Image (cartoon, rainbow, N blue to C red):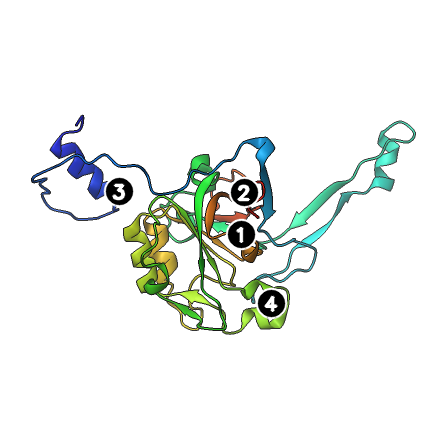
Amino acid sequence: DDISDAQLAEFIVADMRLLMVGEVRILNKAILVEAHRRKPVELSGRRSTFVDLSHTIEDGLVTYPGLPAPIICDYLSRADSRQNYAAGTEFQIGKIEMVANTGTYIDCPFHRYEHGADLSQVGLEAFADLDAIVIRADYRQALAIDAAFFAEKELRGRAVLVHTGWDERWNTPAYFQEHPFLTGEAAEYLRRCGVKLVGIDSMNIDDTRGKSRPVHSTLLAAGILIVEHLCNLGNLPDEGFSFSAIPPKFKGVGTFPVRAMARLPRGDR
């Protein structure tokens, strides 16, 4: 019992990301000690395996309709480099021209909000080794993923990965049509649950048939990161693994491709 009522009230308000809250009082506080319900995730280097959750980015790949495909080429070719080095020594230096929303990418608050944190301002702990859970929401059953899909799940402090199966359409025209998405209600529920990150294996976490983006708006306003265009979520268990999606440390950029991955105890895949 080493926290005051005032400190506890302040912590609860901050943890639930509540705004414009009046006076909060703690009444009849009782300290309960109980074992954590989650299974510990064993992630020692020799006993873990990795699952790649990112699509491959290649020259000409269209990730999102209306955005240009990346141009990937040589800045310095191997043949041209030979004049700079000893016989038998050559190098390639690549050149990439692309928009930030390419391949499997992560959104930080700056993507949506002018004064939100950009890639360089978000700590590594928000990107790496997050305790994760997979929510199954097969697109064949429903495209709109509402709060009911997340009910009765232990979500606080976790990366929530929504597996719809839509990634099977990647790099085809069908990927851009009538894709699965979260509802605004679902985003509000996830915010209240205090999740750390939300990912989806679809073209967009929002419904793109209209112009509003309630899911991006709600999650990024609360500092909850978003990963879109994931893949291979069907190869993961529902829980018992960690998730990482680390972008480069760019200033003034809110979105960038990541090498997303899951780390599982060996034998659990």
Left or right, 131 with reference to 48: left
Distance between the alpha carbons at the discs numbered 2 and 1: 8 Å
| Residue identifier under label 2 | 264
Q: Is residue 230 visible?
A: no
Q: Position of residue 230 (x, y in %)?
A: 54, 55
The image quadrant of residue 188 is bottom left
Which of label 1 and label 4 is nearer to you? 1
Which residue is rendered at x = 89% and y = 27% of the image?
86
* Whether label 1 touches label 3, CB < 8 Å: no
Q: Position of residue 200 (x, y in %)?
A: 48, 58
Q: Secondary structure at mark 4?
A: helix
Q: Residues within 10 Å of mark 4 (few under 14, many from 20)?
A: some
Q: Secondary structure at mark 1?
A: loop
Q: Is residue 168 above or below residue 72?
A: below
Which of label 2 and label 4 is nearer to you? 2
The image quadrant of residue 196 is top left
| Residue identifier under label 4 | 169
Distance between the alpha carbons at the discs numbered 1 and 3: 28 Å
Say which mark, if any, is on residue 15.
Answer: 3
- Label 3 amino acid? Asp
- Label 4 amino acid? Arg
Q: Residues within 10 Å of mark 1 (few under 14, many from 20)?
A: some
